[in-house]
Structure formats: structure tokens, C-alpha cells
Image (cartoon, rainbow, N blue to C red):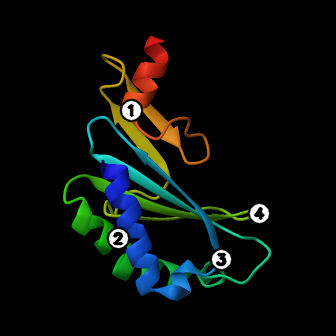
Amino acid sequence: ERINCAMIALLSALDSAPMAARGVFSANFVDTLSKDDLVVALYYRSDSASILDIPAEWERLTLEHTLPKIRESLPAGRITVVARRKGSLPQVVSTDEQLTEPTLVERGLFPGKVVHQVEGSFSNPNGEVTRRVNEW
């Protein structure tokens, strides 16, 4: 449900800031069981001009448009938006100002363990799917 809300909010945010949407060809969403961590990964085409050509402008648009729209739908938890284009390092903006890496922290998936996933290595969109796969 959180991912569905985030999808709708992201579409609304990109509609309200067409410059941020330019070049986006894919978006991935990953949520945790504890619902305290959500990562939205936006993938931009490498063969076209996009807002990623101006990193400070991408960050401003993400802070002013994208994060607030998603936050309206998901009032709790940390939300991180990652932008990536082939051949470049990811750009990260989060509601947690201390976060500078595109990571997801899953607590509660396996008793007594904390799982860190890094953008680009996500295997399932949410912890419940991962739990069921591991039970299988």
C-alpha cells in the first residue's frame, strides 16, 4: 500500500515539475516491513539531456516538489529519492539529512539481524515479499 501511494505521489510530483521528469524512463520503489524506510530510484536516460546535467537543480526540485508530495502520502518514515544515469554516481536526497548513500535498512525481516540493501541490488519491493520468498 505504501508503494502504491508513493507511485501516485511521484507521478503527481513529476507532473508538477516537468523539468524533473525530463529523461526519466523508470522508477523503482522499495519499502521495509517496519515501514520506516522507503527508497524511490529514478533512472534517467543517458542519451538525452536531463535535469541530472544540473545536479543542484535536481536536488532543489526534489526537495521542493518530489519529497513533499511523497511525504503528504506517507507521513511517517524516512523517504529517500535516488537519481541515477548510466556512467554517473547516484544522486541522493532524503528526509533524513544525514543520509548520503542510497541504502535501505530492514529491521525485523530476520530475527536479530539488520539487512542493508544498496540501490541497484534490491531484490524485492518490500520485506514481506522477501520474507515469503525465504520461507518458500
The vertical placement of 136 against 82, above or below, is above
Q: According to the image, label 2 marks what residue? A: 67
Q: According to the image, label 4 marks what residue? A: 87
User: Which residue sits at x=80%, y=75%?
Assistant: 47
Lower sequence index among marks 1 and 4: 4
Lower sequence index among marks 3 and 2: 3
SS state under label 3: loop
Q: Which percent across, then down, holds residue 105?
A: 39, 39
> Would residue 112 be visible to someone looking at this image?
yes
Q: How far apart are marks 3 and 4 (CA)?
A: 15 Å
User: Which residue sits at x=43%, y=71%?
Assistant: 11
SS state under label 1: helix
Q: According to the image, label 3 marks what residue? A: 23
> Would residue 98 be visible to someone looking at this image?
no
The vertical placement of 86 against 126, above or below, is below
Q: Label 2: how many residues lie within 10 Å, few (<14), some (14-19) or many (20+)?
A: many
User: Closest to the observer: 85 or 56?
Assistant: 85
Kindly indicate whether the residue at mark 1 contacts the one at mark 3 (C-beta within 8 angstroms).
no
Q: Label 1: how many residues lie within 10 Å, few (<14), some (14-19) or many (20+)?
A: many
Lower sequence index among marks 3 and 1: 3
Q: How far apart are marks 3 and 2 (CA)?
A: 19 Å
User: Closest to the observer: 7 or 50?
Assistant: 7
Q: What residue type is labelled 4?
A: Gly
User: Which residue sits at x=62%, y=78%?
Assistant: 52
Residue sitting at the far top: 136
Q: Which percent across, then down, holds residue 104?
A: 43, 44
Q: Which percent across, then down, holds residue 82?
A: 51, 62
Q: According to the image, label 1 marks what residue? A: 127
